[in-house]
Image (cartoon, helix red, strand yellow):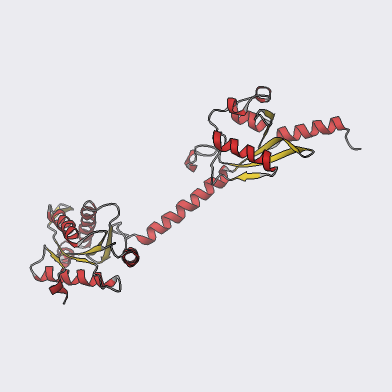
Amino acid sequence: MFPDAVAQARLNELALQRMPCGVFSVDRQLRVMMWNDFMAERSGISVECALGEPLFDLFSGLPGDWLRNKFEAVFLLKISTFTSWEHRPYLFQFTHDRPITGGIDWMQQDCTFVPLTEGVDVIAVCVTIIDVTDLAIAQRAREEAVKALREVSIRDGLTGLFNRRHAEERLSHEFACRQRRPIASFSVLLLDLDHFKQVNDSYGHPAGDAVLKAVAERASRCLRPDDVLGRFGGEEFIVVLPGTELVDAAAVGERIRRAIEAEPVRHDGLNIVVTASIGAAQVREDATTANEVVRDADRALYEAKAAGRNRLVVASPGLLD
């Protein structure tokens, strides 16, 4: 036997109140006309206290202009609309019961705005709020895992600098920018530690590793956030300097050289003296590939070593002939 109209209305009301999501509605004046238990429990405002009250009087922290426009669109267009937590994390600042290690402070919410019609008129807008905090935490965890994997894939395991592959990608990027905008010049430094094999032979590979890490740290301190410092192989490093003319690149290289020789590297009771030879080059106007500026810097580096090491040599037209 089907329930009568009164019983049916009561069942509908009970179902609405027990729903595991937030449900409320507002009239044309944005007064609360419906407020289920989910909303009452999360907000601390009972059904009795909410009904008939202007929504924005109850919650001063709501996104006023955005939400008013949302309601107005539903009243005028008479169609439902949706907003995802990915675009707006939450409508109401409700707490959640997930572990704080999830890294999310407030309940993440998907919200649907539905017109309630009587005849052809929209008499109210019903809003449903779905708690999607678990989904948001899971997605954030995935994004952080992907970011960590990418970071590992572009870093040198010993020094933490960019690896050769990523340094070459950034070099190619700078060259592509220069092709699009000829005035966007850049320079490259190639740095090689002097007599590094003797460090490994005399003190052992752990000492050599300590030297490489110390050099990486000292060189990093001499650079801007947008500069690219990578381990190019063994004891060789590359620095890509975006938007940098050769004279300024030489100044950066000399600053790095002095920082490296400034004090010995201390390891296991040892004081290991470290110096570096550096070649500097600016991308040439007639260059057709990014590798050409690296070759120019490499020739300058060779000259620095041939001239006695622990010095910087700038690639000049005569040197490159």
Between 204 and 17, the one nearer to me in the picture: 17
Vertical side of 17 occupied by 219: above or below: below
Q: Quadrant of the C terminus?
A: bottom left
- For this orientation, the residue located farthest to the left is 308
- Count up the numbered dots: 0
* Residue 316 in sight from this viewpoint: yes
Q: Provide residue 59's location: percent of width, then percent of height.
A: 57, 28
Vertical side of 237 occupied by 35: above or below: above
Q: From the viewer's perspective, is 277 left or right of 88?
A: left
Tell me which residue sits at (13%, 74%) in the image: 318
Tell me which residue sits at (62%, 28%) in the image: 55
To which quarter of the image does residue 26 belong? top right
To which quarter of the image does residue 235 belong? bottom left
To which quarter of the image does residue 252 belong? bottom left
Q: Quadrant of the N terminus?
A: top right
Tell me which residue sits at (48%, 52%) in the image: 143
Q: From the viewer's perspective, is 138 left or right of 120?
A: left
Between 98 and 14, the one nearer to me in the picture: 14
Tell me which residue sits at (29%, 52%) in the image: 225
* Residue 165 in sight from this viewpoint: no
Q: From the viewer's perspective, is 196 left or right of 14?
A: left
Between 84 and 183, the one nearer to me in the picture: 183
Q: Provide residue 151's location: percent of width, then percent of height.
A: 38, 57
Q: Provide residue 81's location: percent of width, then percent of height.
A: 64, 44
- For this orientation, the residue located farthest to the right is 1
- For this orientation, the residue located farthest to the top is 49
